[in-house]
Amino acid sequence: MIERLALDTSAAVDYIREDRLSPPQIKDAKIVVIPLTVVGELFHGASCSALPDVSRAIVESVIDRWKPLLPNVETARVYGEIRTALFRTTENLSASKVNDLWIAALCIQHHYSLLTNDRGFDRIAGLTVIHW
């Protein structure tokens, strides 16, 4: 059993969408949270969808199901450390990758494993990543 699990956007979307297989680790986790950055990415996707009102309601139900994991000053410190470490090895980070660093910082700060299918998280030191 997974004690503490945070969902990346890819895991949340696969859970929400009926045409995709839900990540099996979600049902095996004792505690599941959703980082605030992921909530923002879900609302963005909902607003861009063919049925934005319906999609936003689904995002609201996700927020009701899983507690949002909120950043604070300590999150910003961890974010800065991660970004600095990657800056020394990577030339540029796209805007979407910056969001990933905030997600990773929250997970590291609060000791959550991150459920994702994004291989970009694998290079972040100190982050426990679970793929399905």
Image (cartoon, rainbow, N blue to C red):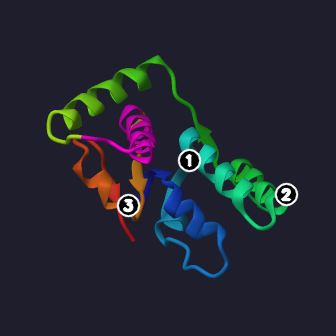
Q: Amino acid at mark 2?
A: Asp
Distance from the alpha carbon under mark 2 to that under mark 1: 18 Å
Task: Return the x and y of residue 67 as percentages of the image width and height.
Answer: 64, 43
The amino acid beneath tag 3 is Asp
Q: Tags 2 and 1 in contact by the CB under 8 Å rule?
A: no
Q: CA distance from mark 3 to mark 1?
A: 13 Å
C-beta proximity under 8 Å, tags 3 and 1? no
Residue at the extreme top? 73
SS at mark 1 in the image: helix
Under mark 1, the amino acid is Val
* Of pointers 2 and 1, the one earlier in the residue sequence: 1
Mark 2 — residue? 53
For mark 1, what is the residue? 38
* The quadrant where residue 122 appears: bottom left
Q: Earlier in the sequence, mark 3 or mark 1?
A: 1
Q: Which residues are magenta?
A: 92-109
29 to the left or right of 114: right
Question: Would you say the residues marked 3 and 2 are in contact, meaning their CB atoms lie under 8 Å apart?
Answer: no
Label 3: state its secondary structure: loop
Question: What residue lies at 59% left-to-right and 49% top-to-bottom?
Answer: 41
In the displayed structure image, the side of residue 107 where residue 44 appears, left or right: right
Q: Nearer the viewer, residue 77 or 95?
A: 95
Q: Which mark is residue 118?
A: 3
Residue drawn at (59%, 64%), measured in percent from left and top? 13
Q: Which mark is residue 99?
A: none
Q: Secondary structure at mark 2?
A: helix
Quadrant location, the N terminus:
bottom left
Closer to the camera: disc 2 or disc 1?
A: 2
